[in-house]
C-alpha cells in the first residue's frame, strides 16, 4: 500500500478525497498539523505523496521540501491554495511540486491529478541501491557483515532499508536478528508473477530500527524455483521500495548469487587476514573482473582483524593487488553474545569498536552521517542476561 502524508488545511473537505485516495491504492493518509511535522514523516518513512497548502511553505521548510522532491523520484507533491493566481501556481512549481489544486477540489479533480502523477511515478528512474555481501568461502562473516551493515544503515534511514537472505535452506539472517517471520523469500519466489510492492511488504518482517527483513526460505525444494531471474525481479522490486537493499548471498558462484552480484551497485567481498581466505578472495576478484564488474563496484572488507592474524593488511593488499576498503575488528565476545541474543552489534554493545566499525563502513558506502540521524544512532539498548539465556534455550527447542 502506498503512503500519503497530508498537511491539515490542504483541502476544505478532505473526506471525499480520502476515499479517492484509498481507491488509488493509498492507505489512509498520515495527517500532520504542520508542514514541518509532515516533512519529518516523509523523511522517516516510504512516502509517495505529500499534499500541502502552498501557504504552509515557510522559508525554513522550503529548502528541505525542495531537496526531498528533487532527491526522491518516488515522492511527488500536490500543492493547494484558495485561489489559482499565476504567482501562486508558479511558486508551487518552483518548489518542485508537480500538481496544483484548489482547496475546494472535488474528488474527480483530485483523481485526475493522481492519474497524472501515476505516469510520473511509473517513469521515475529506479533509485534504491543494492549492496550484495559475498564470499565464496563460508565462515568468513558474510552474514554478520550483511546484518550489521543493514542495521547501521537502517538507523540512519528507518523504514527505508531492507535485508534479503538469498541462502536457500540454511539462511541465518533472521536468526541473527531474533526473528521468526511467518513469510519468507520462498513466498516471493512462488508468487513472482504477482510480485509487487504490497506482496513484498507483506512478506517483509519488522527488524530493529525499521529494518525490513526478507528472510531465507527454509525449503530446500525451492532452490530450483528461486532462479537468477527471480532474484533479479525481487531486487528490482526492492529498489522501488527501499533506499538501500543489502543482500546476503550463498557461498558459491551459483545462479542466485551471480544474479544478485550482477544486480548490485556495490559488492562487498568479505575476507579475513588468513592465507586460505585471501587466496579465495584473490580468485574471486579475478572472477569479478571476468564477470565485467568495475573495480569501483567491488569493495574488499576485511573481517575479524586482530593481533592473531599472520598476514598484515599491507601484505593482504599486495596479494590482492588492490586496496582494502574496510576493516572490521575481531571481537569474539561481542560477536558471539550479540548473535546469541539475536541483536545487531549496535544494539548489544554500541560503544564497542566492533559496533563502531560498522558505522564507519556505512559512512564509507553512504557518506557521512547527518546531524539528525547521528542523534538517532546515539540511542542504545543493551540486552540483559536473562533474555539471552531465555532465547538460547528457546532456539535449542526449535
Ligand atoms: N568481527 C567478528 N569478530 C568475531 N567473530 C566474528 C566477527 N564477525 C563474525 N564473527 C563470527 O564468525 C562466524 C561466522 O560468521 P557468519 O556471519 O555466519 O559467516 P558466513 O555468513 O560468512 O558463513 C560467526 O560465529 C560469527 O559470530
Ligand atoms: Mg552466512
Image: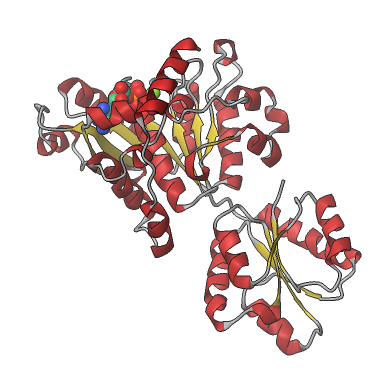
Q: Residue at x 16, y 38 (%)?
A: 317
Instruction: Provide residue 23's location: percent of width, then percent of height.
Output: 85, 51
Instruction: Provide residue 111's location: percent of width, then percent of height.
Output: 85, 61
Instruction: Provide residue 334's location: percent of width, then percent of height.
Output: 27, 32
Looking at the image, the residue that sits furthest to the front is: 386
Tell me the colour scheme of the image: secondary structure
Residue 282 lies left or right of residue 380; in this view the side is left
Res. 53 image quadrant = bottom right
Depth order, front residue of 276/287? 276
Question: Residue 266, can we see it?
Answer: no
Q: Residue at x 67, y 41 (%)?
A: 197
Q: Where is 274 relative to 107, above or below?
A: above
Res. 195 image quadrant = top right
Question: Residue 11, can we see it?
Answer: yes
Q: Quadrant holding ligand 2? A: top left
Instruction: Provide residue 304's location: percent of width, then percent of height.
Output: 22, 31
Q: Where is 83 relative to 389, above or below?
A: below
Residue 326 lies left or right of residue 66; in this view the side is left
Depth order, front residue of 123/340? 340
Q: Where is 137 relative to 99, above or below?
A: above
Q: Residue at x 39, y 45 (%)?
A: 152
Depth order, front residue of 329/278? 329
Residue 319 lies left or right of residue 253; in this view the side is left
Tally the marks. 0
Quick one: quadrant of the N terminus?
Answer: top right
Amino acid at each position: 500500500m502506498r503512503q500519503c502524508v497530508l498537511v491539515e488545511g490542504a483541502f476544505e473537505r478532505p473526506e471525499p478525497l480520502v476515499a479517492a485516495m484509498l481507491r488509488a491504492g493509498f492507505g489512509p493518509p498520515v495527517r500532520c498539523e504542520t508542514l514541518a511535522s509532515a516533512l519529518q514523516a516523509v523523511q522517516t518513512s516510504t512516502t509517495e505523496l505529500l499534499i500541502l497548502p502552498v501557504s504552509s511553505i515557510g522559508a525554513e521548510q522550503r529548502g528541505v521540501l525542495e531537496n526531498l522532491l528533487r532527491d526522491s523520484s518516488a515522492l511527488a507533491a500536490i500543492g493547494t491554495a484558495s485561489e489559482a493566481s499565476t504567482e501562486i501556481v508558479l511558486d508551487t512549481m518552483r518548489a518542485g511540486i508537480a500538481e496544483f489544486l484548489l482547496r475546494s477540489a472535488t474528488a474527480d479533480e483530485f483523481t485526475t491529478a493522481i492519474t497524472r502523477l501515476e505516469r510520473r511515478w511509473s517513469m521515475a528512474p529506479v533509485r534504491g541501491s543494492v549492496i550484495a555481501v559475498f564470499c565464496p568461502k563460508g565462515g568468513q562473516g558474510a552474514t554478520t557483515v550483511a546484518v550489521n551493515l543493514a542495521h547501521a544503515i537502517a538507523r540512519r534511514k528507518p523504514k527505508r532499508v531492507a535485508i534479503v537472505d538469498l541462502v536457500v535452506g540454511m539462511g541465518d539472517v533472521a536468526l541473527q536478528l531474533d526473528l521468526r517471520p511467518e513469510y519468507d523469500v520462498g513466498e516471493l519466489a512462488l508468487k513472482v508473477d504477482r510480485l509487487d510492492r504490497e506482496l513484498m511488504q507483506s512478506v517483509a518482517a519488522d527488524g530493529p530500527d525499521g529494518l525490513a527483513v526478507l528472510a531465507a526460505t527454509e525449503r530446500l525444494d525451492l532452490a530450483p524455483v528461486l532462479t537468477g531471474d527471480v532474484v533479479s525481479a525481487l531486487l528490482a522490486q526492492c529498489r522501488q521500495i527501499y533506499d538501500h537493499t543489502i543482500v546476503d548471498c550463498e557461498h558459491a558462484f551459483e545462479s542466485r548469487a551471480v544474479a544478485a552480484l550482477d544486480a548490485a551497485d556495490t559488492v562487498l567481498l568479505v575476507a579475513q587476514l588468513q592465507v586460505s581466505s585471501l587466496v579465495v578472495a584473490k580468485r574471486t576478484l579475478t572472477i569479478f573482473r571476468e564477470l565485467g564488474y568495475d573495480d569501483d563496484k567491488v569493495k574488499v572488507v576485511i573481517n575479524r582483524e586482530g593481533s592473531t592474524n599472520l598476514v598484515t593488511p599491507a601484505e593482504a593488499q599486495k596479494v590482492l593487488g588492490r586496496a582494502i576498503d574496510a576493516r572490521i575488528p575481531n571481537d569474539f565476545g561481542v560477536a558471539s553474545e550479540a548473535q546469541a541474543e539475536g541483536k545487531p552489534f549496535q544494539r548489544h554493545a554500541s560503544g564497542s569498536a566492533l559496533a563502531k566499525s560498522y558505522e564507519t563502513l556505512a559512512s564509507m558506502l553512504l557518506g557521512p552521517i547527518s546531524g539528525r540521524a547521528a542523534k538517532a544512532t546515539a540511542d542504545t539498548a543493551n540486552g540483559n542476561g536473562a533474555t539471552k539465556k531465555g532465547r538460547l534455550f528457546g532456539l535449542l527447542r526449535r
